[in-house]
Image (cartoon, rainbow, N blue to C red):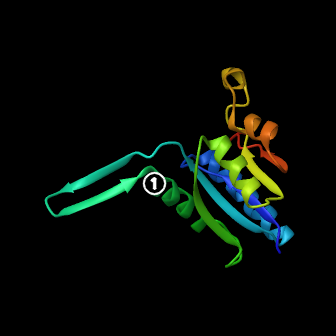
């Protein structure tokens, strides 16, 4: 069985930078990359009118984000998957990694400086609760 690397994403540029770093690691190690986007509620929205209606859930939106990011990554075909995972971003990553025997979780360093550091960051929460190694990518633009 191939090793699994998990990367958490949302639609931010910093998350995309973390995903690019995760893709490079997965390719270099011959690991399978799982791109995960978390969702915390079961909100459902309906759009349209009459019989032309579409229903979109929070899970659908999260999966869409994970799919879009995964499509932009340079990973060999068959070595990348994308999923939506229930929970706050940190808990979704931790639970997913535990359930899928991941060997590494990759996250960006967003909110690890200044006031964000006091309030808490996803990277900090993942680092303290992960069942595996954690790689925190420097996603600052000026770095």
In-image side of 40 versus 90 (left or right): left
Q: Is residue 54 left or right of residue 85?
A: left
Residue 4 rendering spot, x and y as whole percentages: 78, 64
Residue position for label 1: 61
Looking at the picture, does residue 29 appear above or below residue 115? below
Q: Residue furthest front?
A: 99
Residue shown at the point (28%, 52%) measured from the top left: 46
Category of crowding for the residue at label 1, using alpha-carbon neighbours closer than 10 angstroms: few (below 14), some (14–19), many (at least 20): some
Q: Nearer the viewer, residue 88 or 113?
A: 88
Looking at the image, residue 129 sits to the left or right of residue 122; the answer is right
The answer to whether 44 is drawn above or below residue 115 in the figure is below
Residue 119 spot, x, y in % from top left: 66, 23
**Quarter of the rendering containing residue 88:** top right
Image quadrant in which the N terminus is located: bottom right
Q: Is residue 19 above or below residue 3?
A: above
When asked about the image quadrant of residue 115, the answer is: top right
Q: Which structural element holds mark 1?
A: helix
Above/below status of 110 relative to 78 = above
Task: Name the residue at 21% across, 56% down.
Answer: 48
Location of the C terminus (image quadrant) = top right
Q: Residue furthest left?
A: 50
In the rendered image, residue 67, in percent from the top left (x then y), is placed at 54, 64
Residue 47, position in %: x, y? Answer: 26, 53
Tell me what residue is drawn at x 36 percent, y 55 percent.
56
Q: Residue at x 45, y 57 (%)?
A: 60
């Amino acid at each position: 069985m191939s090793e699994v690397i998990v990367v958490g994403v949302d639609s931010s540029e910093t998350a995309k930078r973390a995903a690019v770093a995760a893709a490079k690691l997965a390719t270099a190690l011959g690991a399978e990359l799982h791109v995960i986007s978390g969702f915390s509620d079961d909100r459902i929205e309906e759009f349209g009118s009459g019989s032309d209606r579409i229903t979109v859930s929070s899970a659908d939106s999260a999966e869409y984000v994970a799919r879009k990011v995964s499509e932009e990554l340079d990973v060999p075909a068959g070595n990348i998957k994308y999923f939506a995972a229930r929970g706050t971003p940190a808990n979704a990553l931790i639970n997913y990694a535990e359930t899928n025997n991941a060997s590494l979780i990759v996250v960006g360093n967003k909110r690890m400086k200044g006031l964000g550091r006091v309030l808490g960051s996803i990277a900090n929460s993942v680092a303290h609760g992960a069942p595996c190694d954690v790689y925190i990518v420097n996603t600052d633009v000026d770095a």
